Amino acid sequence: MEEHLHTPVKPFLISQGCTLSELVQRMGGTSFQARNLARGVEIWAEMLKGEVTIFFGLAGAMVPAGMRHVMVYLIQNRLIDCLVSTGANLYHDLHESLGRFHWQGHPCADDRELAGSRIYRIYDVLTSEEEFDRTEEFVTHFSSALEQDRAYTTREYFFLLGKELLNQGREEGILAAAAKANLPVYCPAPGDSVFGTALAAMRVKGEKQLLFDVIKDVIEMVQIASSASSTGVVFIGGGTPKNFIQQTELCGYIFGKELKGHEYAIQITTDSPQWGGLSGCTFDEARSWRKITPNATTVTINSDATIAFPIMVSALSEMSAEGIKNRKKPAFLLGRELTIL
């Protein structure tokens, strides 16, 4: 009986002047997703203390929902070491970096009226089709200026795009911050975004034929994982970024190695496993693939990421200030080739 009944639930205490880190610590004494959120902060803080290379998977419409500067904080302060994102989030980041906006709307807006006004809706977020088209023109102009006689990894492409934004003095978003920090950004499905459609339009018009080498992306990701003494993952949602990161631990054989699997894993998701999709896939299932180690330290937070994510990062900024400052982190040079220092 005692092996089960050893830790009582602590009722949440309300008090004035409670900091966010104190809030999360109190949540850790409760249950359900409040405790899981607090556990996620603990695991992330543990990763920051050790020599752990932290991969971050970004799916869902997080940038339109206002999470862009949370990502910038992670990059600037190196709470993560490698970002894998959907193309859409990177496009939305570019859109805002160019001084454009996403607008608060309503989920029950008349979509036929919005379509007639050339306004796109993402749940309760709105964006202007005209402004989106201007951002696509920026992508076309930027891509046309690149060498067309070779293929680019998505990592090199988005590094160069981030540098271009820095050179133009644009607002520092995800891509610009990553370029300044020499933090690699990968996009395993660039065709599933306006980056892909913009390049497709260029090709059909006979203007340019810029190509992505996504296979080299895979090779570089395995190089990063192979060079690390330990690896951890943080996932917002699932999708392509989640699998692209998890599969790195299966692909050590490319270099004649057997990788042990990710040793830390955090995911924030609203999906559930019984539908068979990756967004709801459990870390227990990932163990069967050896994507994570049998004894990996893991937590799944079943929550809207726009709630859990900023709370977790804000709490980390308070609780782990010394760990962030003194962290032993991997260093990269991001030219045509990826160099791990």
Image: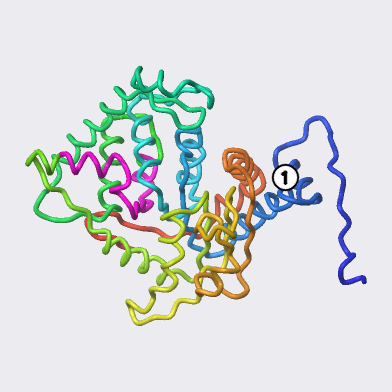
Q: Is residue 302 magenta?
A: no
At which x and y percent is residue 205?
9, 38
At which x and y percent is residue 200?
19, 43
The residue lying at 55 percent from left, 50 percent from top is 325
The amino acid marked with disc number 1 is: Val
Q: Secondary structure at mark 1?
A: helix
The residue lying at 81 percent from left, 49 percent from top is 30
At which x and y percent is residue 139?
23, 36
Mark 1 surroundings within 10 Å by alpha-carbon count, few (fewer than 14), some (14 through 19), many (20 or more): many
Q: Is residue 190 magenta?
A: yes
The magenta span reads 176-201
Task: Look at the image and tell me in which quarter the C terminus lies.
Answer: bottom left
Which residue appears farthest toward the left when viewing the image?
206
At which x and y percent is residue 251?
38, 73
Q: Which image quadrant for residue 336?
A: bottom left
337 displayed left or right of 73 = left
